[in-house]
Image (cartoon, rainbow, N blue to C red):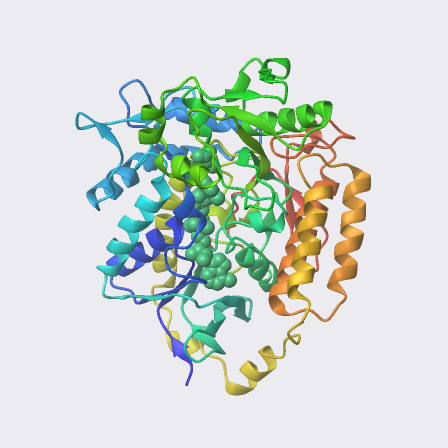
Amino acid sequence: MALETDFIVIGSGVAGLRSAVELAAAGARVTVLTKDKASESNTEYAQGGVAVVLSDDDNAELHEEDTLVAGAGLCDPEAVETLVTEGTRYIKQLIDWGTEFDREGGRLVFTQEAAHSRRRILHAHGDSTGKEIVRALIARARAEKNIVLMPFANTESLIVRDERCRGVRFLDPILRAPRELFAKAVILCTGGAGQLYQHTTNPSVATGDGMAMAYFAGAEMADMEFVQFHPTALNIEKAPRFLLSEAMRGEGGILRNKYGERFMGNYDERLELAPRDIVSRSIVAEMRRTGTRNVFLDMTALSEEFLKERFPKIYETCKMYDLNIAKDLLPVSPASHYCMGGVRTDLHGRSTLAGLYAAGEVTCTGVHGANRLASNSLLEGLVFGARAGAAALADSAGLDLKDFKETDDERRAANDEPAPDGLATAVRKRVKRVMWERVGILRDRDSLTRALREFEQIARANLSVSSRNFVTLARLVAAGALWREESRGGHYRLDFPERREDFRVHSIQRKDAPMKTSERINFEQ
Ligand code: FAD
Ligand code: SIN
């Protein structure tokens, strides 16, 4: 007996939870499949905060302008306008649902981050903004009796028939067996792919599964070459790269080299608050110049009392490594952090494949262009999560679920997938290393060609679905980066260091089709 529901949401970060609530509040049955426990996501670890127009000296035009500048000529202006104008309403709603952003004397407090012309970043419990948002959204989702939240349900592929997405194949956590679930529409909210790189701020769930699933299902992928590297991840030998929030530099943190010299002035007049890609490249240049593997974040001009209160999670985590953030210089280096590229969607989360919607970091909506403005992605997850839910609901009116189930024969054929490989760990390790060394902060034709050759070789082995997904995604990033013979936003080519007007277009990749370009992300369906 095939399982069915009205709508499937994959992922329980900000985008997935917000879209599930949108659907369930309208009376639809929603199943949320998520890979780990419900709270495990990039959202959970978001530190700095969420950018929103709410302070007295701010307005939507300023937020829009900052976002467009950061996006380096590749933002979709309509998508940005949607984000900044609708964002305020969704944040107010989140507050109504119980999210406790930090306040002083009852008034919301705003912090500063790079490339924002105003202090417009709301935060919670100092540096645990994502955790607080997830807490409030899970509580809100649990209040909807139509939402079934299924943790530890890893989804591996989408079911497509007659050019429409009709459901998913996932690993049932109780039966410990693959199962199919059918629905009128699937909303992909699986987040980013920071784990493609050897060094990343992302948790282990961020392997880009949704992007690969959408690609194999036939959806278009856009701007895969644009990856954001965060400048300041704590660099301790063998430890995971824990993020030291940009808000630390916003509050006055300084970057120093191994000689204790403040070096950002040699690279950009905006110093430590230059855009992320510039700070990351400056750090790499400084590390090369001084022959070191890290630089230092210096917070010692601020009092311990302030830092402990403002950055409690960071304070405690650094203490575990015997570092006092108020007294010690903190070793940092860049790490992969965010994917600007992803599943191409219109302004309502529709992908180019009927029945498949997407929201959050898995997408390319046109909001971020070539480089995301800090703290814009939690907002994007809320706004476009809600929009994708609403569009899936409206588009499915009149559809009958019984038309969506496959026959047993069709299912057996679809299940004819590659055997599990015993190489999964080795494959991932190799791909991550190649991505870091050859498809990283600095790229050129030679490094990208070599990376692609290696990925093609790995892909020839008899891989499991998840290994195949992983290496395919790596190939999409490298192929986009090789095609883009310019430097723009998060993508830097040593052999093409300038921005080129003829490349002010989006790269579009689709399975079994040559790379194409488009002037806009948004499309008519
Ligand atoms: P996620 O929150 O990543 O959720 C993805 C969900 O999909 C997870 O539940 C995951 O388990 C599930 N999933 C993945 N694959 C599968 C699968 N195969 N089957 C089933 N489920 C699956 N942004 C900001 O705006 N402000 C910040 O301060 C900020 N700080 C950050 C700090 C860190 C350390 C990191 C890593 C990111 C930060 N970001 C920040 C970025 C931001 O957190 C993310 O872009 C955003 O939360 C993404 O939300 P999402 O819902 O799209 O995806
Ligand atoms: C940070 O706190 O530095 C991360 C903010 C973001 O990625 O938007």
Q: Is residue 262 visible?
A: yes
Q: Quadrant of residue 420?
A: bottom right
Image check: 45 left or right of 227?
A: left
254 or 413: which is nearer to us? 254
Image check: 173 left or right of 508?
A: left
In this rendering, is residue 201 above or below 213? Answer: above
In this rendering, is residue 12 above or below 116? Answer: below
User: Whole-percent x and y of residue 349?
Assistant: 44, 50
In this rendering, is residue 432 above or below 248? Answer: below
Q: Quadrant of residue 281?
A: top right
4 or 162: which is nearer to us? 4
User: Whole-percent x and y of residue 364?
Assistant: 53, 45
User: Whole-percent x and y of residue 170?
Assistant: 48, 71
Image check: 77 left or right of 268?
A: left
Q: How many marks?
A: 0
Determine the residue located farthest toward the left in the rendered image.
106
Residue at x 77%, y 36% (from the top left corner): 444
User: Whole-percent x and y of residue 434?
Assistant: 72, 48
Q: Quadrant of residue 308?
A: top left
